Image (cartoon, rainbow, N blue to C red):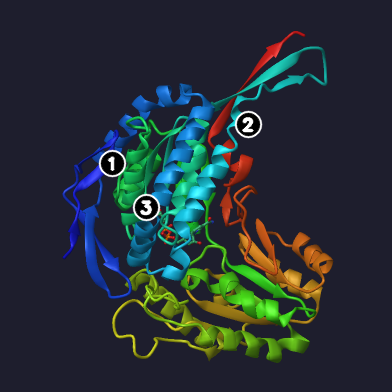
């Protein structure tokens, strides 16, 4: 039985989409269609932006502490839907339930952390003038209507990290989620509705290219926050540059994991899957270039190969599963294509390298570890976005740092090493927005951003909140 929906969420209620088109939603574990939602059009976006515009003055004038209170209530509504949300995410993008069980709780905690920043918006910020007499009062204002565009790999969390700071800042929003994963976003709108946000503060239009570009180009949108691929980010950035519209762009990566020669192998074994292949490798900050010291290469490769090949692959609803299906047939073809490219370039698959036996349905590939990779190969330079690890030997730490930084991207990295000071010194030399020491790290209170082709702007913490603000300085003679 296919779930059929023909509505979009605008002005505090579900209303029929103006589009005749519908998008089928696949269950990646079976390849079957399980739901159908509107593929929204320009008129839907116009209506959503108009509602957000109408709601903006009232929401912007609502005291920041009250807006923070609404975020806390929304967090409670998300917690109340925790099981339904995690089941929904696993059904729509195939992320194993062992991961999605914590996704709603993470989202709720993130909203509470954002709410704790409300004092930054209310504190009087008076600054003396260091160059002459006089002082200035610095006022912070919400930017206006924010357009949020998100990808499919973390369908709830990647919306929340935009929605929370946008709403706390006083912006109203129009969300366009990825066409592969609109169902968790719909459930989030139900939580928004139950929270009692004023009509028009949060609006959502499901859809694909037409809706996305209508939102980016809309003359009454004041801010775009986009998470997705670098290619699309460049296009959106170009449009926003032409329009002089502020844009936050969180883009792709090809992150390195540097294993130092004093690594504690039990720490490496316990963390490498999460660091490099979380969400079946469909994670922006997955460290898929594994840099091993040449004199310990074979021993460490054997350990990693053993860990990867013994992690369970299969039904994403089985709590033991680590590797699920990829999100779509298109994504599977992309990943298989890179496996062929790797083999053609001379790399050797010591684990996997193709389609798994025994899984006839669904969008599965084999988790794969390539050895004999050189830094210039395409599989070492381009984002694959699947469970494919490229193992590269290095001779000394300087070379490891040079290989790690030899990338168009700069989103994340991990350094494995027993001597924490030494590992931190290596971390300091990496041109990247996030570095985990001996684990997969990120922190809702610390900025998350990409260097180089991994993005512009930042999310998380006070720095993420500032992306939805503009400033006025009022100058006094004394
Ligand atoms: P994508 O193809 O760039 O799409 C992302 C979103 O943008 C989707 O909603 C997509 O909808 C929309 N879109 C595409 N073209 C558009 C356009 N011209 N104008 C407006 N919207 C447009 O990325 P994806 O395949 O969904 O996600 C995977 C990518 O996201 C990877 O590169 C990954 O590294 C990156 N990512 C980055 C982060 C981070 O924080 N840095 C986090 C997660 C993922 P349509 O497909 O319908 O067009």
Q: CA distance from mark 3 to mark 1?
A: 18 Å
Label 2 environment density (alpha carbons within 10 Å; few <14, some 14–19, many ≥20): some
**Circle 3: element type:** loop
Q: Which quadrant holds residue 362?
A: bottom left
Q: CA distance from mark 2 to mark 3?
A: 30 Å
Disc sitting over residue 9 in the figure: 1
Q: What residue do we see at 43% from left, 42% from top?
A: 74
- Name the quadrant of the C terminus: top right
Q: What residue do we see at 62% from left, 66% from top?
A: 440
Ligand 1 has an atom within 8 Å of the beta carbon of the residue at disc 1? no
Q: Is residue 227 visible?
A: no
**Circle 2: element type:** helix
Q: Quadrant of ligand 1?
A: bottom left
173 over 279 or under it: above or below: above
| Residue at mark 3 | 81
**Circle 1: element type:** strand
Asked if marks 1 and 2 touch (Cβ < 8 Å), the reply is no
Q: Residue 139: x, y in percent? A: 61, 22
Disc nearer the start of the sequence (1/2)? 1
Disc nearer the start of the sequence (2/3)? 3
Q: CA distance from mark 1 to mark 2?
A: 31 Å
Q: Residue 117: x, y in percent? A: 60, 36
Q: Residue 284: x, y in percent? A: 53, 62
Q: Is residue 418 visible?
A: yes
| Residue at mark 2 | 120
Q: Residue 412: x, y in percent? A: 63, 62
Q: Quick one: 97 or 349, which is closer to the camera?
A: 97
> With 445 as the anchor, is 284 left or right in this view?
left
- Name the quadrant of the N terminus: bottom left
Disc nearer the start of the sequence (3/1)? 1
């Amino acid at each position: 039985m296919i779930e059929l929906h023909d509505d979009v969420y605008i002005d505090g209620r579900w209303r029929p989409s103006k589009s005749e088109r519908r998008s089928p939603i696949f269950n990646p574990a079976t390849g079957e269609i399980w739901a159908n939602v509107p593929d929204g059009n320009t008129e839907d976006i116009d209506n959503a932006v108009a509602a957000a515009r109408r709601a903006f003055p009232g929401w912007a004038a609502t005291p920041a502490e009250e807006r923070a209170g609404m975020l806390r209530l929304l967090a409670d509504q998300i917690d109340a839907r925790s099981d339904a949300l995690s089941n929904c995410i696993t059904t729509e993008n195939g992320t194993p339930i062992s991961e999605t069980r914590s996704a709603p709780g993470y989202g709720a905690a993130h909203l509470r952390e954002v709410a704790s920043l409300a004092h930054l918006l209310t504190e009087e910020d008076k600054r003396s003038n260091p160059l002459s007499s006089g002082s200035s009062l610095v006022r912070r204002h919400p930017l206006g209507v924010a357009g949020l565009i998100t990808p499919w790999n973390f369908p709830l969390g990647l919306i929340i990290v935009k929605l929370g700071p946008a709403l706390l800042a006083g912006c109203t929003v129009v969300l366009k989620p990825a066409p592969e994963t609109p169902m968790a976003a719909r459930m989030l709108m139900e939580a928004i509705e139950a929270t009692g946000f004023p009509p028009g503060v949060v609006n959502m239009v499901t859809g694909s290219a037409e809706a996305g570009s209508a939102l980016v180009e809309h003359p009454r949108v004041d801010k775009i926050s986009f998470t997705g691929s670098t290619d699309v980010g460049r296009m959106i950035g170009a449009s926003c540059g032409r329009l002089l519209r502020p844009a936050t762009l969180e883009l792709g990566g090809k992150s390195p994991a540097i294993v130092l020669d004093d690594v504690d192998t039990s720490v490496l074994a316990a963390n490498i899957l999460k660091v490099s292949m979380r969400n079946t490798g469909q994670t922006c900050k997955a460290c898929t270039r594994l840099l091993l010291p040449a004199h310990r290469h074979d021993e460490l490769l054997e350990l990693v190969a053993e860990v990867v090949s013994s992690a369970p692959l299969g039904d994403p609803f089985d709590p033991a599963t680590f590797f699920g299906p990829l999100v779509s047939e298109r994504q599977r073809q992309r990943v298989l294509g890179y496996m062929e490219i790797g083999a053609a370039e001379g790399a050797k698959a010591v684990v996997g390298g193709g389609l798994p036996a025994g899984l006839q349905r669904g969008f599965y590939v084999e988790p794969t570890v390539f050895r004999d990779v050189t830094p210039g190969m395409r599989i070492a330079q381009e984002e694959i976005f699947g469970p494919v690890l490229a193992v590269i030997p290095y001779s000394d730490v300087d070379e490891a740092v040079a290989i790690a930084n030899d990338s168009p991207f700069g989103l994340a990295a991990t350094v494995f090493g027993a001597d924490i000071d030494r590992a931190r010194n290596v971390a300091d030399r990496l041109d990247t927005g996030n570095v985990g020491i001996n684990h997969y790290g990120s922190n809702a209170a610390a900025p998350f951003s990409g260097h180089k082709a991994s993005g512009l702007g930042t999310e998380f913490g006070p720095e993420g909140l500032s992306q939805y603000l503009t400033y006025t300085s009022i100058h006094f003679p004394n």
